[in-house]
Amino acid sequence: MNETSAKKDTQKLQRIIVDALEDVKAQEIVVFDTEEMSALFERVIIASGTSNRQTKALAASVRDKVKEAGYAKPRIEGEDNGEWIIVDCGSVVAHVMQPTIRSYYNLEEIWGDKPVRLKLGAPKPAEPVRKPVAKKKANVSAGRTPTRRDSIPVGPMGSEALKPTRKAPAKTSGKPVAKSAVKSSAKPAKKTATKPATKSATKSATKSAPKAKPKA
Protein backbone atom coordinates (compact mmCIF):
# COMPACT_ATOMS: atom_id res chain seq x y z
CA MET A 1 0.00 0.00 0.00
CA ASN A 2 1.49 3.32 -1.07
CA GLU A 3 1.43 6.49 0.98
CA THR A 4 -1.58 8.05 -0.76
CA SER A 5 -3.80 5.00 -0.35
CA ALA A 6 -2.64 4.61 3.26
CA LYS A 7 -3.75 8.17 4.06
CA LYS A 8 -7.13 7.60 2.43
CA ASP A 9 -7.55 4.39 4.40
CA THR A 10 -6.71 6.23 7.64
CA GLN A 11 -9.20 8.98 6.85
CA LYS A 12 -11.88 6.41 6.09
CA LEU A 13 -11.22 4.59 9.38
CA GLN A 14 -11.29 7.92 11.23
CA ARG A 15 -14.71 8.72 9.75
CA ILE A 16 -16.08 5.30 10.70
CA ILE A 17 -14.96 5.71 14.33
CA VAL A 18 -16.36 9.24 14.62
CA ASP A 19 -19.71 8.12 13.18
CA ALA A 20 -19.81 5.21 15.62
CA LEU A 21 -19.21 7.60 18.53
CA GLU A 22 -21.92 9.97 17.31
CA ASP A 23 -24.43 7.11 17.07
CA VAL A 24 -24.22 6.66 20.87
CA LYS A 25 -24.26 10.44 21.60
CA ALA A 26 -20.61 10.89 22.55
CA GLN A 27 -19.66 14.35 23.80
CA GLU A 28 -16.77 16.65 22.80
CA ILE A 29 -15.30 14.50 20.04
CA VAL A 30 -11.86 15.69 18.91
CA VAL A 31 -9.32 14.23 16.46
CA PHE A 32 -5.57 14.87 16.38
CA ASP A 33 -3.03 14.07 13.69
CA THR A 34 -0.17 12.19 15.39
CA GLU A 35 1.67 11.00 12.28
CA GLU A 36 4.80 12.99 13.13
CA MET A 37 4.63 12.25 16.87
CA SER A 38 4.36 8.46 16.90
CA ALA A 39 5.20 5.62 14.56
CA LEU A 40 2.49 3.38 16.08
CA PHE A 41 -0.63 5.30 15.01
CA GLU A 42 -1.58 8.30 12.87
CA ARG A 43 -4.74 9.56 14.58
CA VAL A 44 -5.90 9.98 18.17
CA ILE A 45 -9.61 10.41 18.84
CA ILE A 46 -10.89 11.53 22.23
CA ALA A 47 -14.55 11.47 23.28
CA SER A 48 -16.50 11.67 26.55
CA GLY A 49 -19.26 9.53 28.03
CA THR A 50 -21.32 10.61 31.03
CA SER A 51 -21.39 7.20 32.77
CA ASN A 52 -19.74 3.77 32.81
CA ARG A 53 -22.67 2.43 30.85
CA GLN A 54 -22.29 5.01 28.09
CA THR A 55 -18.50 4.66 27.79
CA LYS A 56 -18.90 0.89 27.40
CA ALA A 57 -21.61 1.42 24.78
CA LEU A 58 -19.37 3.88 22.90
CA ALA A 59 -16.45 1.43 22.86
CA ALA A 60 -18.72 -1.40 21.69
CA SER A 61 -20.15 0.80 18.92
CA VAL A 62 -16.64 1.62 17.64
CA ARG A 63 -15.61 -2.04 17.74
CA ASP A 64 -18.69 -3.23 15.85
CA LYS A 65 -18.62 -0.49 13.15
CA VAL A 66 -14.91 -0.99 12.44
CA LYS A 67 -15.38 -4.75 12.18
CA GLU A 68 -18.41 -4.35 9.88
CA ALA A 69 -16.36 -2.09 7.58
CA GLY A 70 -13.91 -4.95 6.94
CA TYR A 71 -11.06 -3.88 9.23
CA ALA A 72 -9.37 -6.05 11.81
CA LYS A 73 -11.16 -6.42 15.14
CA PRO A 74 -9.98 -3.62 17.47
CA ARG A 75 -8.29 -4.31 20.80
CA ILE A 76 -10.10 -2.83 23.84
CA GLU A 77 -8.54 -1.96 27.21
CA GLY A 78 -10.20 -0.64 30.36
CA GLU A 79 -13.71 -1.90 29.51
CA ASP A 80 -14.17 -3.47 32.95
CA ASN A 81 -13.68 -0.16 34.77
CA GLY A 82 -15.48 2.04 32.23
CA GLU A 83 -13.82 5.29 33.30
CA TRP A 84 -11.22 5.25 30.52
CA ILE A 85 -11.54 2.82 27.62
CA ILE A 86 -8.93 2.61 24.85
CA VAL A 87 -10.04 1.20 21.49
CA ASP A 88 -6.97 0.39 19.38
CA CYS A 89 -7.98 0.23 15.71
CA GLY A 90 -4.44 0.14 14.29
CA SER A 91 -3.66 3.45 12.62
CA VAL A 92 -6.36 5.18 14.73
CA VAL A 93 -6.68 4.97 18.52
CA ALA A 94 -9.86 6.11 20.28
CA HIS A 95 -9.94 7.17 23.94
CA VAL A 96 -13.40 7.07 25.52
CA MET A 97 -13.28 8.80 28.90
CA GLN A 98 -15.56 10.15 31.57
CA PRO A 99 -15.34 13.96 32.00
CA THR A 100 -13.47 13.93 35.34
CA ILE A 101 -10.86 11.45 34.08
CA ARG A 102 -10.49 13.36 30.83
CA SER A 103 -9.87 16.68 32.54
CA TYR A 104 -7.41 15.10 34.96
CA TYR A 105 -5.17 13.38 32.36
CA ASN A 106 -5.65 16.09 29.71
CA LEU A 107 -4.67 14.07 26.65
CA GLU A 108 -5.34 17.10 24.44
CA GLU A 109 -2.18 18.69 25.83
CA ILE A 110 -0.14 15.63 24.88
CA TRP A 111 -1.49 14.90 21.39
CA GLY A 112 -3.17 18.16 20.44
CA ASP A 113 -0.50 19.86 18.35
CA LYS A 114 -2.30 19.17 15.04
CA PRO A 115 -6.08 19.05 15.45
CA VAL A 116 -8.13 17.67 12.55
CA ARG A 117 -11.26 19.49 11.51
CA LEU A 118 -14.41 17.41 11.64
CA LYS A 119 -17.88 17.74 10.16
CA LEU A 120 -19.93 16.44 13.04
CA GLY A 121 -23.58 15.62 12.66
CA ALA A 122 -23.58 15.57 8.86
CA PRO A 123 -27.22 15.72 7.78
CA LYS A 124 -28.66 12.75 5.93
CA PRO A 125 -30.13 13.31 2.47
CA ALA A 126 -33.77 14.25 2.74
CA GLU A 127 -36.38 11.96 1.25
CA PRO A 128 -38.25 13.30 -1.77
CA VAL A 129 -41.59 14.88 -0.92
CA ARG A 130 -44.46 12.89 -2.32
CA LYS A 131 -47.38 14.92 -3.65
CA PRO A 132 -50.89 13.70 -2.85
CA VAL A 133 -52.42 11.85 -5.78
CA ALA A 134 -55.80 10.94 -4.29
CA LYS A 135 -57.81 13.29 -6.55
CA LYS A 136 -55.95 12.19 -9.67
CA LYS A 137 -56.62 8.52 -8.92
CA ALA A 138 -60.29 9.23 -8.39
CA ASN A 139 -60.54 10.96 -11.77
CA VAL A 140 -58.85 8.09 -13.56
CA SER A 141 -61.05 5.48 -11.88
CA ALA A 142 -64.16 7.42 -12.92
CA GLY A 143 -63.09 7.26 -16.55
CA ARG A 144 -62.42 10.99 -16.88
CA THR A 145 -59.17 12.62 -17.94
CA PRO A 146 -57.84 15.04 -15.28
CA THR A 147 -58.21 18.67 -16.32
CA ARG A 148 -56.55 21.88 -15.21
CA ARG A 149 -59.49 22.63 -12.92
CA ASP A 150 -58.67 19.51 -10.86
CA SER A 151 -55.45 21.16 -9.71
CA ILE A 152 -57.24 24.22 -8.27
CA PRO A 153 -57.04 24.08 -4.44
CA VAL A 154 -60.36 23.64 -2.70
CA GLY A 155 -61.21 26.53 -0.39
CA PRO A 156 -62.63 26.40 3.13
CA MET A 157 -66.21 26.20 1.74
CA GLY A 158 -65.45 23.00 -0.18
CA SER A 159 -65.57 22.32 -3.89
CA GLU A 160 -69.03 23.93 -4.19
CA ALA A 161 -67.44 27.36 -3.56
CA LEU A 162 -65.57 27.08 -6.88
CA LYS A 163 -68.75 26.53 -8.94
CA PRO A 164 -70.51 29.58 -10.55
CA THR A 165 -73.70 30.63 -8.78
CA ARG A 166 -76.99 30.19 -10.63
CA LYS A 167 -80.47 31.60 -9.98
CA ALA A 168 -83.01 29.23 -8.52
CA PRO A 169 -85.42 27.94 -11.22
CA ALA A 170 -88.45 28.05 -8.86
CA LYS A 171 -90.23 31.00 -10.53
CA THR A 172 -89.83 29.68 -14.08
CA SER A 173 -90.94 26.11 -13.33
CA GLY A 174 -93.44 26.29 -10.44
CA LYS A 175 -96.20 28.82 -11.19
CA PRO A 176 -96.81 28.03 -14.92
CA VAL A 177 -97.25 24.40 -14.06
CA ALA A 178 -99.75 25.23 -11.31
CA LYS A 179 -101.82 27.56 -13.50
CA SER A 180 -102.00 25.14 -16.41
CA ALA A 181 -103.00 22.33 -14.09
CA VAL A 182 -105.83 24.37 -12.57
CA LYS A 183 -107.10 25.60 -15.94
CA SER A 184 -107.01 22.19 -17.54
CA SER A 185 -108.66 20.35 -14.66
CA ALA A 186 -111.11 22.69 -12.90
CA LYS A 187 -112.88 25.04 -15.33
CA PRO A 188 -113.46 22.79 -18.35
CA ALA A 189 -114.71 20.01 -16.11
CA LYS A 190 -117.16 22.36 -14.41
CA LYS A 191 -118.64 23.63 -17.69
CA THR A 192 -119.15 20.20 -19.20
CA ALA A 193 -120.57 18.80 -16.00
CA THR A 194 -123.22 21.44 -15.09
CA LYS A 195 -124.55 23.51 -17.95
CA PRO A 196 -124.85 21.00 -20.77
CA ALA A 197 -126.38 18.45 -18.43
CA THR A 198 -129.16 20.77 -17.11
CA LYS A 199 -130.19 21.97 -20.58
CA SER A 200 -130.60 18.51 -21.98
CA ALA A 201 -132.49 17.38 -18.92
CA THR A 202 -135.06 20.22 -19.08
CA LYS A 203 -135.63 19.75 -22.83
CA SER A 204 -136.31 16.09 -22.47
CA ALA A 205 -138.61 16.71 -19.53
CA THR A 206 -140.77 19.26 -21.39
CA LYS A 207 -141.10 17.06 -24.47
CA SER A 208 -142.16 13.96 -22.60
CA ALA A 209 -144.67 15.64 -20.32
CA PRO A 210 -148.26 15.79 -21.75
CA LYS A 211 -149.76 19.16 -22.27
CA ALA A 212 -152.58 20.07 -19.99
CA LYS A 213 -156.02 20.38 -21.74
CA PRO A 214 -158.10 23.42 -20.91
CA LYS A 215 -161.09 22.70 -18.76
CA ALA A 216 -164.54 23.16 -20.26
Image (cartoon, rainbow, N blue to C red):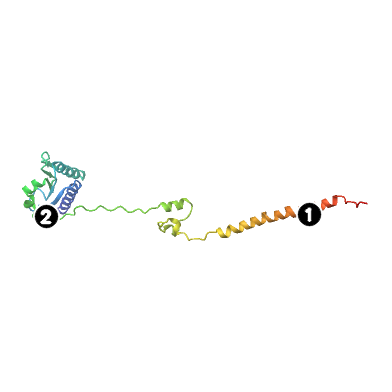
Q: Secondary structure at mark 1?
A: helix
Q: Who's the residue at 8% across and 51% down the image?
A: 108
Q: Is residue 67 left or right of residue 206?
A: left
Q: Could you say which disc has been placed on residue 52 in the image?
A: none
- Of marks 2 and 1, the one in the foreground: 1
x, y percentage for residue 125? 27, 53
Q: Is residue 137 left or right of residue 76?
A: right
Cα–Cα span, label 2 and label 1: 129 Å
Mark before the other along the chain sequence, 2 or 1: 2
Q: Crowding near pointer 1: few (<14 within 10 Å), some, many (20+)?
A: few
Residue marked by disc 2: 115
**Could you tell me the amino acid type at mark 2?**
Pro
Q: Is residue 154 left or right of residue 129?
A: right
Quarter location, residue 149: bottom left
Q: Nearer the viewer, residue 58 or 69?
A: 58
x, y percentage for residue 174? 58, 57
Residues at marks 2 and 1 touching, judged by CB atoms closer than 8 Å = no
x, y percentage for residue 72? 16, 43
Residue marked by disc 1: 199
Q: Secondary structure at mark 2?
A: strand
Is 155 rendered above or below residue 62? below
Q: Who's the residue at 6% across and 51% down the image?
A: 110
x, y percentage for residue 139? 45, 53
Q: Nearer the viewer, residue 208 or 93?
A: 208
For this orientation, the residue located farthest to the front is 216
**Could you tell me the amino acid type at mark 1?**
Lys
Q: Nearer the viewer, residue 176 or 133?
A: 176
Residue 205 in view, yes or no = yes
Quarter location, residue 161: bottom left
Q: Is residue 200 left or right of residue 139?
A: right
